[in-house]
Image (spheres, rainbow, N blue to C red):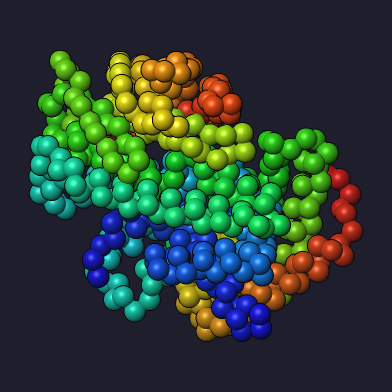
Amino acid sequence: MARPSDEQIARWYPRLYRTALRMTGSAEEAADLTQEAFCRALAGWDRFDGRALPTTWLHRVLVNCVRNARRGPRRSGEPLEEWSLAADPSGRPPEQAERAEALRRLRRAMGGLPATLRGALVATALDGYTYREAAELLAVPVGTIASRVHEARKLLRAAMREAPPEPGP
Amino acid sequence: MNDEARLELEERIHALLCGALDEPQRRSLLLTVARDEAARRLLEEICVFQRDARAALICPADEEAMQSGLRRLLACLDAEDTAPAAAPPTRRRRRPRPVAGTWVWRLAASAALAAALVLAVAAYHAGSRTRDDLRRLDRRIAMAQMTASELATYRRVWREVAGPAGRPKPWVLLHDGGGRFEYLPGTEAEGAAGRFVVLRCALATDDGEVLERVNLLLPAGQVVRASLDEAGRLAGRTIRCRVDAEGERVGMDLELADGAAGTVGIRGGVRLGDRPTEIGRVKLNGRTLRVILDARAVSGGVS
């Protein structure tokens, strides 16, 4: 397989970075690990046989990098759960509060999804993998990803309609 | 729409948002979206859900860190590529003068893609109940900071134009799918390895529609004064720019000139790495246009 171009790397980088960010909770650590994953993958690119998609292979390398990093001493960084929700700069304060509340409820609802549905949703909607890529990552057929994502969104819609507002932070 | 068709459409829409469709697939899907109310609602739902899910679970302020990480990675890979053990030192050297066709066509393709998206979004607007959401989507497309792939394109253009060290410093104007460049007399650039500044000036309406956009590449960390008598055209008027860059600050005088109708203009500046900044507004044919500047320093790589 030909070594990927800068353009391909630039296209793949954001989703891998987001995956690392979601796994580590630290922007700095995510950037370091994404860089490490790319460098490792590209150094061994001649071993990539092209049977999987390049992004799938990179994802696996990244996940290994994150696991290895976690075996060592933890670097500083904010845990994901402690991040405050960003205010919409165009919104007025009451709208910002409503938006923040809605996002809190959505986060809680996503946390309550069955693991299979959540995995498909995170891989596609959050990490930005296509259904085909997500199917490779999760080792299930593409149709299964499609139905899981659809079901997850349906459950979240219902949960968002029914969930009572959380008390403020 | 039955369940199977809906799932298949969801997959295509998601692939569109991932940038994974080729041109015919994209056109076909956008045509469907423009014609079919149910498809529009589905696109809206998926866009809104994806935006909210990311806002709920990913720190929204990570964009700059991500761009910075990507720049660092590309610089690192460039350095590895040009290390003596990995490749001959001449590998990154390009022909001294660029052949316009190579990068102009790439830029033209990018512009055509952007235009196709804007047209599709415009079609999506018409007759749709999702007007407000689409306006937000359009605003995001138009007003977003420079993307990694745009920066990668600019980096390649800069490498082509800057050539080896010792040449005069260039500036490059990229506009409307094409580009032109000149060399600043009496100067010597560091070649393709040098940092450069991407300065973007956008003229946008109040609701975020970008009517015109001018991109300039300038050598970084130096005093650069460039005057562009025709950087673009808008509503029959010529866009003139004077750029004044020094250190971390880039200033611009912008004029919309028309011999018969007179000239309107504005002056302002931004610091490198700041978010896109509105330097003011100009009135043109009864419309108020926001003038937005965005400037970034980019590593040209190692020659």
Q: Is residue B113 above or below residue A91?
A: below
Left or right: where does residue B50 sit relative to residue A137? right
| Quadrant of the rendered image containing residue A169 | top right
Q: Is residue A17 above or below residue A88?
A: below
Residue at 41% across / 18% down in the picture? B260
| Quadrant of the rendered image containing residue A64 | bottom left
Horizontal and vertical percent position of residue A149: 63, 73
Q: Nearer the viewer, residue B1 or B292?
A: B1
Residue B253 in view: yes
Residue at 12% across / 26% down in the picture? B166
Left or right: where does residue A68 sit relative to residue B302? right
Q: Is residue B300 above or below residue A154?
A: above
Quarter that holds the C terminus of chain B: top left
| Quadrant of the rendered image containing residue B23 | bottom left
Residue at 55% across / 69% down in the picture? B32
Q: Nearer the viewer, residue B159 or B119?
A: B119
Q: Nearer the viewer, residue B6 or B81?
A: B6
Residue at 79% across / 57% down in the picture? A105
Horizontal and vertical percent position of residue B64: 50, 40
Residue A23 in view: no
Quarter that holds the N terminus of chain B: bottom right
